[in-house]
Image: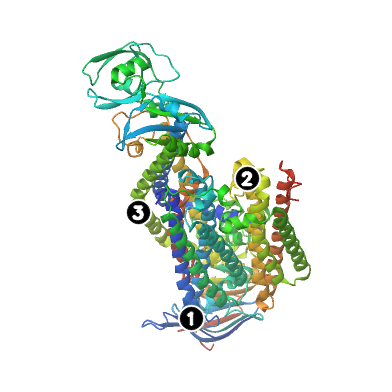
Amino acid sequence: MIRLNDISKAFNQRQPNEFWAVRDVTLDIDAKRVTVLRGPSGSGKTTLLSMIGCLSRPTSGRILLGERNLSGLPERFLTQIRRETFGFIFQRFNLIQGLTVLDNVMLPAYPLAPDHHELVQRAHTLLEQFGMASKRESKVEWLSGGEAQRTAICRALLNDPQVIIADEPTANLDTRLSQEFMNIIGELKAAGRTLILTSHDPVVSEAPCVDRVITLRDGQVQAS
Amino acid sequence: MLLSPAILALIGVSAVVTALLLLAAVFAVRVLRHWDLQSGSELQLRLERSTYLISTLVTFAIAAEVVALLLFVYNAESMHTQFVGAMCATGVLNVNAWGWPALLLKIAVFFAGTVWLLLNRLDNQGYDYPLIRLKYGLLLVLLPLVATAAFVQLQYFLNLNPDVITSCCGSLFSPDAQGVAAEVSAVTPRDAMLALYGSGALVLASGAVYLWRRRFATLFAASAAIAFPVAIVAIVSCVALYVYEHPHHHCPFCILKSGHDYIGYWLYIPLFTATALVLGVGALSPWRNIASLRAAVATDARRYAAIALAGFMLFYAVATFAIVRSNLTMAGTWW
Amino acid sequence: MSHFVRRQRYLIDFTVASLARRKGKNLGLLGVYTLIVFLLASVMLFTQALRQEAGLLLENAPEVVVQRMVAGRHDLIPADYLERMGRIRGVAAQYGRLWGYFYDPAVQANYTLLVPRDRDINNGEMIVGHGIARTRGLGTGDFISFRASSGTTFSFRVAEVLAADAELVSADLLLVNEADFRAFFGIAEGLYTDLALEVRNPQEVRKVAEKLTVLLPDTRPILREEILRTYDALFQWRQGIVFVLLAGSLLAFVIFAWDKASGLSAEERREIGILKAIGWETADVIRMKFWEGALVSLGAFLLGYLAAYIHVFFFDAALFAPVLKGWAVLYPQFRPQPFIDGLQVATLFFFTVFPYTVATVVPIWRAATTDPDAVMR
């Protein structure tokens, strides 16, 4: 469902420190499957992930989401697609300090200005699903690693996205929590969502729910 | 020159607005030269980011100009005690030859700026920014207009000498006096009202046709462009007289005062808004066949047209109301 | 429309929480901003009050005052000029006035002696203005002596002290009856200091003045409206000068605002990156940042204006009074009457909120175009 054709991304173009993070990557991501991008740091997996998730634009090449060509879209539209289609879980959770769990979960919907009551309901349902309902008024600074992880998952699911993207999701978790996380991933896959993860953690790439592992090195896909 | 804070503020705002537009124009030129939506290069990304800045700068500049226009009129009103013979803002604007041009240019900036903003809003809804070259080209035309308005206003203030005797609206607006203002009020009330209702009927009719059929947008816009000056003439030569209940008080500003129930606002705000929106419709509709804008033109133009028609109807209603409820009866003389 | 309102509500919600999270930085900005508003608003409110006061006081002054000029200088005017004037159309009343200045070496101040038309004063008595009473420690029943130019000392008993309310004009006033006045200054019967005319219709005043210049060619008519205009221009001019002097601090404020808006901490940058990553668009971030500025501006404007109001109307503008009132030994103490008008508020807005917002436009844009990609790393 997501097709990349000859994707390349450069930083500091036309300057002495020009750097190609991703080079001529051609890839197909299947729907309703779990795909893991594996590789050492500097292999370009985070860059590739951000391009798939409409967070940044490729320097050259085309990205197709279903039938839609994403590469030439201006930011406004990219953001719209990102909001509707993708949910993000970041390596360091990236929750906004000083806000409560509930506020953090509702944040992605603010620009869409839905009915407030309905939004709170949606957020509550998600929090309950992940066992965070009792902590909804706590400030996120006081959460444990696992709780923060689950809050981040709730936030990613708020706009009911088709695709979940997670960047090094288990980097700050111990083995037990990492396995718990992969179980959640399995549940999300069973619910019909597409998942794309990056990781160099074997707990992730060797989990039973993972359908495909893609290895990256120096910005290029290795034949597996 | 008078060194009052309000005048300093007005000169300052105009200067700053010109500077903001100049900054926007610099970025606009860069966009015009290097824009390539298909390229993912860093230059293109930077250009796309700068479009946000340009939008913000121009929005802010026009908003400031609108408020400054009001401040300009209020200030002129409050300064009338310092000029011999000036009974209200009209007298103050007559002190030197720069006064009325300054006001007219400010009004022109309001219309040009608003139409640009409406066009910008439309373009932003197209996923391929189809009008980007056009709108930034127009921005380069807007800039000299704003600069001229600022300059003329500055000249006006620099040449304000409190001891100069000026003619107050009574002697200026009497038909024997020279100048545009005199000619405007020399139009007989009967002619003015006929023109008013005639142009009003044209605007409302072409607007209704546009809403129903989505056609003849240019006609609609043209009718508004005619209706606006006709309305101003009608206010000066007829409606104002009924508001003041005085057959020779033609001033267009005194109707904004509390003594007349602020009826001026009920006349001017709908008139200006409606005219600006219809001009916007005229600017938007040529692009209805561009694929990425089709839906946006349909929704936006429709909304603007509807609001504008409501505005015009309100204006004509209030104008008629002012005449009807007035104690002035000129049944034999004028009608 | 309601969607628009709802969206602004959500943005404001976030903005308020965001401001509260960085109290230190925002309170500092608020403080400086409030100070600027306070300074400018104080000057404007006080000048406005002075203008009002002058206007109110001159309300009862005669519309036209006729003074005789000899060799370009003001001289005494014969009473028969009143007959020579005859009946000019539009003049409701015409009469002679007696008033003069007296320099008191004891306090190095100039007094104004006046013969009032509406009071009866006994011989040897005088009514004293509040300012003089204060300076020379006089109360009703006290005696005060002056040395006339003839060398004789005149002694007066204070019959009454004028109320403090209209001090702006009466602070240095001494009222005596006609006989005492003429004796003190040595002015013969049949001469007045000047003539006063009351004209009901303001539009006829100029016509009356024109006729006077023809009828009495050695006189000059001074119109009340001219005095008002001159005071107006004077106060406006003084106000403008103070504003220009404050331009330096305004510039400093603008630079400060720019700096504060540009100096985003790493934490703030990260937050914006997060917002964009989870689905906020650049335009949304710009709007949010503008709301931040708007809320701070609103707070500063209200606080500053309120503080200025209290400063001017409860503390009599202690900081600015000398510059704006003018140079005098006897400072009249007067209570400025509260008066706020839309033009004033709008001008203040353009001197404070507008420069602040302009200074923050480019920094806000820079912040809002933070690359969300950076947050992934």
- Disc number at residue C252? 3
Residue at 69% across, 60% down: B308
Above or below C12: residue A59: below
Find the distance from the CA under tag 1 to the CA under tag 3. 37 Å
Q: Which residue is mark 1?
A: B33
SS at mark 2? loop
Residue type for callout 1: Arg
Residue type for callout 2: Tyr
List x then y, in percent, for residue A32.
66, 76
Toward the viewer: B90 or C30? Answer: B90
Q: Local crowd at mark 3 within 10 Å, few (<14), some, or many (≥20)? A: few
- Disc number at residue B262? 2
Residue at 30% across, 16% down: C183
Find the distance from the CA under tag 2 to the CA under tag 1. 49 Å
Toward the viewer: B139 or B105? Answer: B105
Q: Local crowd at mark 2 within 10 Å, few (<14), some, or many (≥20)? A: few
Above or below B327: residue B227: below
Give me the chain letter of mark 2: B
Above or below A1: residue C360: above
List x then y, in percent, for residue C224.
44, 35
Residue B276 visible to the viewer: yes
Q: Local crowd at mark 1 within 10 Å, few (<14), some, or many (≥20)? A: few
Residue type for callout 3: Ala
